[in-house]
Image (cartoon, rainbow, N blue to C red):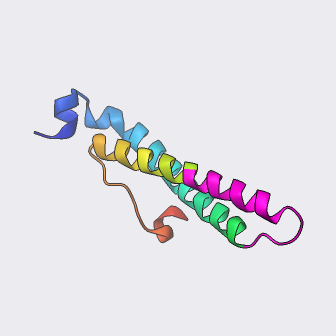
Amino acid sequence: MKTLDYLHLNETKVAGVVSALNQLLADFQVHYTNLRGMHWNIKGYGFFVLHEKFEEMYDDTAEKVDEIAERLLMLGSTPENKFSEYLK
């Protein structure tokens, strides 16, 4: 049995939600990568405070990415995992 059948959802009606979730996943993945870059490249005054704060932020973002990907799976979609696709 397909997931959408089990959930009593119509594939065409869910398509807009799947599309929006794919865009959200791409945005969060790019955001995550930017946070990691900021975390790695902090210099100077406030280094320790900012370094820790960026780590908290990218950990939180990673959890959200996972939740979005799992929701896409629940809706019968396959989450994208290539940055070339995210950037499109």
Q: Name, please, the residue furthest toward the right.
A: 45
At which x and y percent is residue 59? 56, 54
Q: Quick one: 11 or 56, which is closer to the camera?
A: 56
Residue at 69% across, 65% down: 39
Would residue 45 be counted in the magenta stretch?
yes
Q: Name, please, the residue furthest toward the left.
A: 1
Q: Tell me if 73 is positioned left or right of 6 in this view.
A: right
Q: Tell me if 27 is positioned left or right of 15 in this view.
A: right
9 vs 36: above or below: above
Q: Quick one: 20 or 50, which is closer to the camera?
A: 50
Residue range corresponding to the magenta coloring: 41-59
Main SS, magenta region, reads: helix
At which x and y percent is residue 38? 72, 66
Could one spot residue 74 in this view of the protein? yes
Residue at 51% across, 62% down: 86
Q: Name, please, the residue furthest toward the front.
A: 48
Residue 68: quarter of image? top left
Q: Tell me if 35 is positioned left or right of 64 in this view.
A: right
Q: How many labels does the image show?
A: 0
Could one spot residue 88 in this view of the protein? no
Residue at 22% across, 29% down: 7
At which x and y percent is residue 84? 49, 71
Residue at 71% across, 54% down: 53
Q: Quick one: 88 or 60, which is closer to the camera?
A: 60
Q: Name, please, the residue furthest toward the top.
A: 8
> The N terminus lies in which quarter of the figure?
top left
At which x and y percent is residue 25? 49, 52
